[in-house]
Image (tube, grey):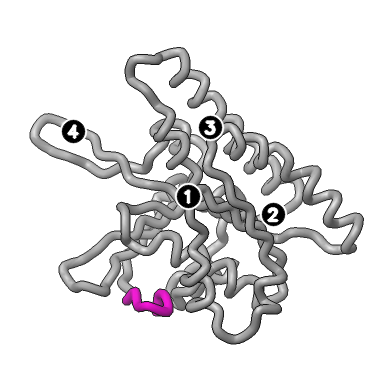
Amino acid sequence: MRFPILELNQHFNSIEILPGIFSVFGDFGVGKTTFALQTAINSAKLGQEVIFVYTKPNVPSVKIQLLNKNSNKILDKILFIQTTRFSELYKIIFNFEFLFLNFLKENKKKFNIIIIDSITNLYRLELNMEKKERNYNLNYQLNHMLANLTFLNDTYGIEIMVVNEVSRKTHGDQITEVESGGKVMEFWTDKKLKISKTKKLNERKLSFAIISENYDLEFFSNLRENGFE
């Protein structure tokens, strides 16, 4: 993957990044979709084939055009898939292997990257505190989806990025921000990037961590109309 932020690319290239799912998360409006789209476009410019799954009602076509002003041929390397139902997202993820093998057979080349924006927003919409059995099934499906994405990463070397939201937990008088999806996301995602707003209007703080390695890094970037810079 080729990220839109030079410093993040430099650190990815300078350390041994373990395989697995890369999670990008943050609050509403911090630029998660912009970051994901820029990563897809930058990677496509390097000749990589990308699957981009979008799980919100309106595809950000204007944003896509702003981020990719040079050539529509770049977008030919990105397969956009949209769904607004969690059950459909579940089926899409379990059809990825078939899609991957069929694409390889017909085009003699493989998909390199899968980006899902977002992995949990549809899951959260269906959670209901009064329906414990339904919530149990949703957690099972989320766990199953992440397990399948890990399998694709391990078996075929496909890089996986999932975009996620923030949940807030209260411990006494303190409120902490954690990645949505709870222990399921903690188990399956070891590489994480949290994007946060700062006191400066366009500035974003990026907190990168590899949990198993006890490695963390913070840096800043500006978010403009044409993306991160």
Mark 1: which secondary structure? loop
Residue 117 is covered by the magenta coloring: no
Q: Give the percent coordinates (x, y) of residue 140.
A: 54, 24
Residue 142 is marked as 3
Q: CA distance from mark 1 to mark 2?
A: 24 Å
Q: Give the percent coordinates (x, y) of residue 227.
A: 42, 75
Between disc 1 and disc 4, whose residue precedes?
1
Q: Are marks 1 and 2 in contact (CB under 8 Å)?
A: no
Q: CA distance from mark 4 to mark 3?
A: 24 Å
Q: Give the percent coordinates (x, y) of residue 182.
A: 39, 33
Q: CA distance from mark 2 to mark 3?
A: 19 Å
Q: Are marks 1 and 3 in contact (CB under 8 Å)?
A: no
**Residue 106 located left or right of residue 152:** right
Residue 56 is marked as 1
Q: CA distance from mark 4 to mark 2?
A: 37 Å
Look at the picture and state if 228 lies above or below 29: below
Mark 3: which secondary structure? helix
Q: Residues within 10 Å of mark 1 (few under 14, many from 20)?
A: some
Residue 170 is marked as 4
Residue type at the position of mark 2: Ile
Q: Are marks 1 and 4 in contact (CB under 8 Å)?
A: no
Q: Residues within 10 Å of mark 3 (few under 14, many from 20)?
A: many
Q: Which residue is denoted by mark 2 in the rendering?
A: 158
Look at the picture and state if 40 lies above or below 115: below
Residue type at the position of mark 3: Leu
Which is more toward the observer, 124 or 190? 124
Q: CA distance from mark 1 to mark 4?
A: 28 Å
Between disc 1 and disc 3, whose residue precedes?
1
